[in-house]
Image: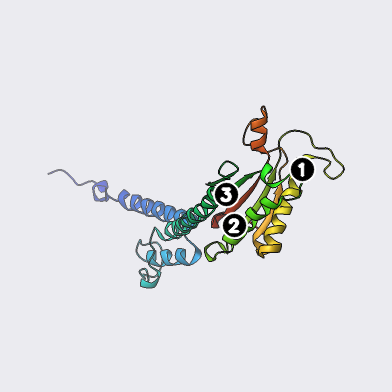
Amino acid sequence: MRKKKKGDSVNKDAWMATYSDLVTLLLCFFVLLFSFSEVNAEKFEAIMKSFQGALGILDGGKTLDEGNRISSNDIPLEKNKNENTDIEDFRMLKQYIDSYAEQKGLEKEINVKIEERGLMVRILDNVFFDPGKADVKPRAKEIILYIGDVLNKPQFANKHIKVEGHTDNVVMNSELFPSNWELSVRRATNVLRLLEGEKHINSRRISASGYGPNRPVAPNDTPANKAKNRRVDIVVLKSTYSQFEP
C-alpha cells in the first residue's frame, strides 16, 4: 500500500472561496457605480440595506424594505412623462398659431415648429419692423398680442419664453444702432415688452436676446436668404430647458 503524503490532506478546492469573494466584491462595485449614477441617496441606502449580510461581506441581514422597492424605470418614466406632456402642449400651441397665420394669410411669414429646445415661432422681420428700425408695426403688434393670449393659457403658463432677435450680415451703423447687435437686441426687447406689458406675462418666465448676424438660418448670398435671416424667434422652452433659465 502507498504511503500517504502530507500534501494529500490539502483542500484543493480552497481557491474557490477566494474566487467567490472576488466575484462578490466585483458585484458590489458595479452596484455602487449604478447607484451613484442612476438613483438618489435615499434609493442608494435602500439598495445597501438589501445587501447587508446577503453576500457575507457586510454585517446585518435586512432585505429591501417594501416602501423602498426600486423600479429601474423610475427616473426615465418621470422624464418621459414630462417630455410627453410638453410635446402634447406644443402640438396644441402650434395648432393655435398655425390656424391664426392661415386666417391672416401669413403662412409664409410665420413659421411654427417643434424643435429640440421646445416650440419655436419664427416671424420674418418685414412683418414686425421697417428696415433698420426696431419699432413694432401695428400689424405685428396684433400678432404678438394673440401669441401672448395663447401663452397665458393654463397649459403654457409655467413655460419659459425666450425672444431672440436676428439680422442678416449687412452692416448696421446708425446713431440709434451702431451695429447689428444693438438692432437685434432692441427688436427682441420691444417684442418682450409687449408680451410683458400688455399681456402681463410674468417677467420671471420671459427673456430677450439679440444675436445680430451670428446665427443665420441660410447663407447671406441672396436677397431671399438675407430676408430669412432677418427674423424674431419666440421660443417656448421644454421643461428640461426651463430649469436652466433664471
Badge 2: residue crowd in 10 Å (few <14, some 14–19, many ≥20): some
Is 166 left, or right, of 159 in this rendering?
A: right
Give the residue at x 69% y 47%: 128
Q: Position of residue 194 (x, y in %)?
A: 70, 58
Residue 116 visible somewhere in the drawing: no
The image shows residue 134 at horizontal and vertical percentages of 76, 47
Quarter containing the N terminus: top left
Asked whether the beta carbons under mark 2 and mark 1 sit within 8 Å of each other, the answer is no
**Residue depth check, mark 3 versus mark 1: number of the one nearer the observer:** 3
| Near-viewer residue (239 or 227) | 227
Going from N to C along the chain, the mark reached first, 3 or 2, is 3
Q: CA distance from mark 2 to mark 1?
A: 25 Å
* Contact (Cβ within 8 Å) of mark 3 with mark 2: no
Front position in the image: 195 or 178:
195
Label 1 element class: helix
Location of mark 1 (residue): 181
SS for tag 3? helix
Q: Amino acid at mark 3?
A: Lys
From the image, state whether disc 2 or disc 1 is nearer to you.
Answer: 1
Asked if labels 1 and 3 touch by Cβ distance under 8 angstroms, the answer is no
Left or right, 104 with reference to 138: left
Quarter of the figure that contains the C terminus? bottom right
The numbered mark, 2 or 1, whose residue comes first in the sequence reads: 1
| Residue 217 showing in the rendered view | yes
Amino acid tagged 1: Trp
Q: Which residue is mark 2?
A: 242
Q: Which residue is mark 3?
A: 104
- The image shows residue 24 at horizontal and vertical percentages of 37, 54
Q: Which-is-in-front pick, marks 3 and 2?
A: 3
State the image coordinates of residue 48 (x, y, percent, origin top left). 43, 64
